[in-house]
Image (tube, rainbow, N blue to C red):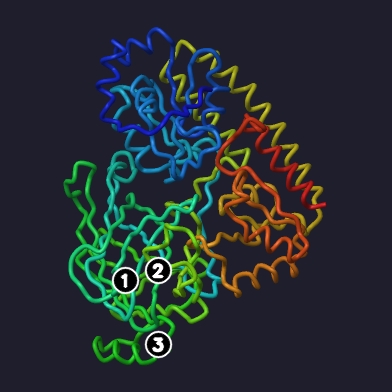
């Protein structure tokens, strides 16, 4: 498995690259055997085990890199252009730019498979995402819904299509900003009224999501009072053309009461609309572009109960307890100086974490990896029928190894004390691990916008630790320095803070089975 570590370049340079190599993708494939690209090191490891010596397997995302945020390099484009088969994870795990690059540069006649979206046919299991609604302030994100489906394939049309949310007008006593805080602290502004916060028309910022996707946001307000923000949305293909069956959503006003009692604004909205007003002040909600109806709604999810609210009859309450100091990082200077007070609706998950309705982290269940291996066997056989016997034998060997790994994981996790089976992490991707091996995701903590969680959030974490006698807290491998809050809470409560692998491999755990066993060993060690 070859891991690419080159810098980022633009895909359109591919033509020049191919000219320099002096050969076509097809020529390279005939000389070197079957060429396979996989989006992540975990998929590449499984594909390499199935392919053996009959194929060259390349991971597009380098080891130790977050597949949620990785953007393709020129080397990736070349590898894709020479590939006979491409394996992506799907379910919106990868950056849309990476998916587009695969779709745009894979040769005609090559095969592309989104593995996570196909494993149920081989006995795999998918788990829906249920957001945590037990919050002391609202989590407010963006979502797209209502995309049509291809009647022949049953899949959502136009994987390269996207929906652009654009903030067009705002008002309020201070600055209003919505932004995404990346895993390493970088900030992508989605909307920003500027320091004066006065009403204006025009573009105040924008962001794009794939069809049927969801992302978390941070929201900041510099002064208490009543705010409004107008949002519009448009669905377009990668070349900018509208999509059949999808409707542009005109500017729709969203109302906020920040640091003030909401009653007065409730009365004002009732008089304006003649409708009862819903106040949202906790739980998980999304500003949702319904592309089939042409409406923007506020979608809430409480214990699996989905409710859609009309923004004209809804008030989002931002309580005084969300008031926090700006951190010292220069990326937050657009909101003021370090130490300035802002009202902050924290981002639910740190990083640009775009996902759909199904958890994409399927590999944390070994039976899902076994299903993926069989899917890869059949895919490679279809691309290279002469290698069928080799792929079948290699897959049988891999399945035997994975079955041993699965049995060992059940043994290890089965021996944990009851309190050791409760996981509190900084990554929300361990649902499959918990579901398969009898663990419980007791909670996950991710500081929003690079600042410390509120007193209420920290107290709730401490209460969870005390109530469940949680022996350890778990952060994503290699991220200890980026999530100091868990270390601080661990010190305060006398519990250990340990690291788990989540989305990638490294030199200490270079194969899928080794990664899964390493996590089991870590949980065992940290539970004692």
| Location of residue 399 in the rendering, given as x and y in whole percent from the top left corner | 63, 27
Q: Which one is nearer the viewer's eye here, 118 or 261?
A: 261
3 vs 2, front mark: 2
**Is residue 491 found left or right of 175 in the rendered image?**
right
Report helix, strand or loop for mark 3: loop
Q: Spatial distance from mark 3 to mark 2, Cα to Cα?
A: 26 Å
| Location of residue 19 in the rendering, given as x and y in whole percent from the top left corner | 26, 15
Identity of the residue drawn at 21% across and 68% down: 251
What number is the disc on residue 336? 2
Q: Most extreme residue toward the top, as rendered?
A: 31
Q: How many marks?
A: 3
3 vs 1, front mark: 1
Q: Spatial distance from mark 2 to mark 1, Cα to Cα?
A: 8 Å
Disc 1 designates what residue? 195
Q: Earlier in the sequence, mark 3 or mark 2?
A: 3
Identity of the residue drawn at 53% across and 51% down: 127
**Is residue 384 found left or right of 512 in the rendered image?**
left
Identity of the residue drawn at 32% across and 92% down: 267
Disc 3 designates what residue? 262
**Is residue 246 found left or right of 281 in the rendered image?**
left
* Contact, mark 2 vs mark 1 (Cβ under 8 Å): yes
């Amino acid at each position: 498995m070859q891991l690419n570590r080159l810098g980022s370049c633009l895909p359109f340079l591919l033509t020049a690259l191919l000219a320099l190599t002096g050969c076509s993708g097809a020529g390279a494939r005939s000389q070197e055997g079957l060429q396979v690209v996989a989006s992540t090191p975990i998929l590449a490891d499984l594909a390499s085990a199935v392919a053996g010596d009959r194929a060259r397997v390349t991971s597009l995302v380098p080891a130790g890199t977050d597949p949620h945020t990785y953007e393709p390099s020129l080397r990736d484009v070349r590898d894709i252009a020479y590939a006979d088969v491409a394996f992506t994870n799907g379910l919106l795990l990868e950056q849309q730019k990476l998916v587009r690059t695969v779709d745009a540069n894979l040769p005609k006649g090559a095969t592309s498979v989104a593995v996570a979206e196909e494993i149920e046919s081989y006995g795999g299991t998918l788990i829906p995402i249920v957001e945590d609604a037990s919050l002391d302030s609202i989590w407010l994100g963006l979502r797209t819904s209502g995309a049509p489906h291809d009647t022949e394939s049953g899949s959502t049309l136009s994987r390269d299509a996207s929906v652009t949310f654009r903030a067009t007008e705002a008002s309020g006593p201070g600055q209003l900003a919505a932004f995404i805080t990346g895993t390493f602290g970088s900030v992508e502004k989605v909307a920003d009224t500027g320091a004066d916060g006065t009403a204006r028309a025009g573009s105040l910022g924008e962001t794009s999501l794939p069809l049927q996707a969801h992302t978390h946001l941070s929201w900041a307000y510099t002064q208490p009072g009543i705010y409004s923000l107008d949002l519009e949305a448009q669905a377009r293909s990668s070349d900018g053309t509208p999509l059949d069956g999808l409707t542009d959503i005109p500017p729709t006003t969203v109302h906020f009461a920040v640091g003030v009692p909401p009653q007065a604004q409730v009365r004002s909205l009732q008089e304006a609309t003649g409708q009862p007003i819903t106040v949202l002040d906790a739980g998980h909600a999304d500003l949702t572009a319904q592309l089939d109806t042409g409406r923007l709604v506020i979608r809430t999810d409480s214990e699996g109960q989905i409710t859609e609210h009309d923004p004209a009859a809804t008030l989002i309450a931002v309580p005084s307890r969300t008031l926090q100091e700006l951190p010292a990082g220069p990326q937050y200077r657009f909101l003021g100086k370090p130490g300035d007070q802002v009202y902050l609706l924290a981002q639910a998950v740190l990083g640009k974490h775009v996902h759909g309705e199904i958890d994409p982290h399927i590999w944390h269940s070994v039976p899902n990896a076994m299903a993926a291996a069989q899917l890869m066997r059949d895919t490679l056989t279809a691309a290279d029928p002469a290698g069928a016997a080799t792929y079948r034998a290699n897959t049988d060997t891999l399945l035997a190894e994975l079955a041993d790994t699965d049995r060992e994981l059940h043994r290890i996790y089965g021996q944990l004390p009851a309190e050791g089976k409760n996981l509190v992490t900084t990554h929300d991707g361990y649902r499959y691990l918990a579901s398969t091996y009898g663990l419980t995701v007791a909670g996950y903590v991710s500081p929003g916008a690079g600042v410390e969680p509120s007193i209420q959030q920290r107290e709730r974490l401490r209460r969870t630790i005390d109530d469940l006698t949680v022996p350890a807290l778990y952060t994503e491998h290699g991220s200890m320095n980026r999530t100091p809050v868990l270390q601080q809470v661990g010190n305060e409560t006398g519990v250990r803070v340990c690291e788990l692998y989540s989305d990638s491999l490294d030199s200490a755990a270079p194969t899928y089975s080794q990664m899964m066993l390493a996590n089991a060993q870590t949980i065992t060690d940290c539970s004692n």
